[in-house]
């Protein structure tokens, strides 16, 4: 049901509404977002589950912020 709502909104060009309709649980389970402590916990859980490769798509207002996020992810992966 939720997937159909998101899809309908997205296809209608209402991308912001579609994003807002995504369940928080889905976003949390499939992304590394939130405060640094939460992201560390998520990385640890993925590592414990046997994940050895992740895709990093940093978000930020400028290049320095994005580079800092990649460095943070690298440090977590290096464990």
Image (tube, grey):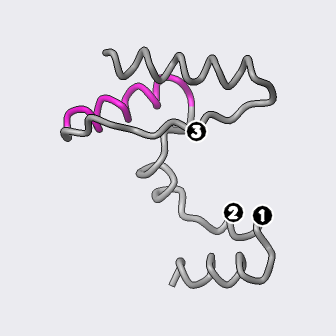
| 66 to the left or right of 26 | right
Is 56 in front, or is 26? Answer: 56
| 14 to the left or right of 8 | right
Residue 45 part of the magenta-drawn span: yes
Residue 51: which quarter of the image?
top left
Marks 1,2: beta carbons within 8 A: yes
Judging by the rendered image, the residue that carries numbered circle 2 is 20
Picture residue at 19% right of the left edge, 38% below the top = 50
Task: Give the Cα separation between the discs numbered 1 and 2.
Answer: 6 Å
Marks 1,3: beta carbons within 8 A: no
- Indicate whether 15 appears above or below 11: above
Q: Element type at marker 3? A: loop
Badge 1: residue crowd in 10 Å (few <14, some 14–19, many ≥20): few
Badge 3: residue crowd in 10 Å (few <14, some 14–19, many ≥20): few
Q: Give residue 16's position: percent from left, percent from top.
A: 77, 63
Judging by the rendered image, the residue that carries numbered circle 1 is 16
Disc nearest the viewer among 3 and 2: 3
**Residue span colored magenta:** 35-48
- Indicate whether 60 appears above or below 18: above
Disc nearest the viewer among 1 and 2: 1
Badge 2: residue crowd in 10 Å (few <14, some 14–19, many ≥20): few
Q: Element type at marker 1? A: helix
Task: Give the Cα separation between the discs numbered 3 and 2.
Answer: 20 Å
Quarter of the image with the C terminus is top left
Q: Give residue 23's position: percent from left, percent from top.
A: 54, 63
Judging by the rendered image, the residue that carries numbered circle 3 is 57
Picture residue at 75% right of the left edge, 23% below the top = 63
Q: Give residue 14's position: percent from left, percent from top.
A: 80, 74
- Indicate whether 29 appears above or below 50: below
Picture residue at 55% right of the left edge, 23% below the top = 70
Q: Give whichever of discs 1 and 3 has the lower sequence position.
A: 1
């Amino acid at each position: 049901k939720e997937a159909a709502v998101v899809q309908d909104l997205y296809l209608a060009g209402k991308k912001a509404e579609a994003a807002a309709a995504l369940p928080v649980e889905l976003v949390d389970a499939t992304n590394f977002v939130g405060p640094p402590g939460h992201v560390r916990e998520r990385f640890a859980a993925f590592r414990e589950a046997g994940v050895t490769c992740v895709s990093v798509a940093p978000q930020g207002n400028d290049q320095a912020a994005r580079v800092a996020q990649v460095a943070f992810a690298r440090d977590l992966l290096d464990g």
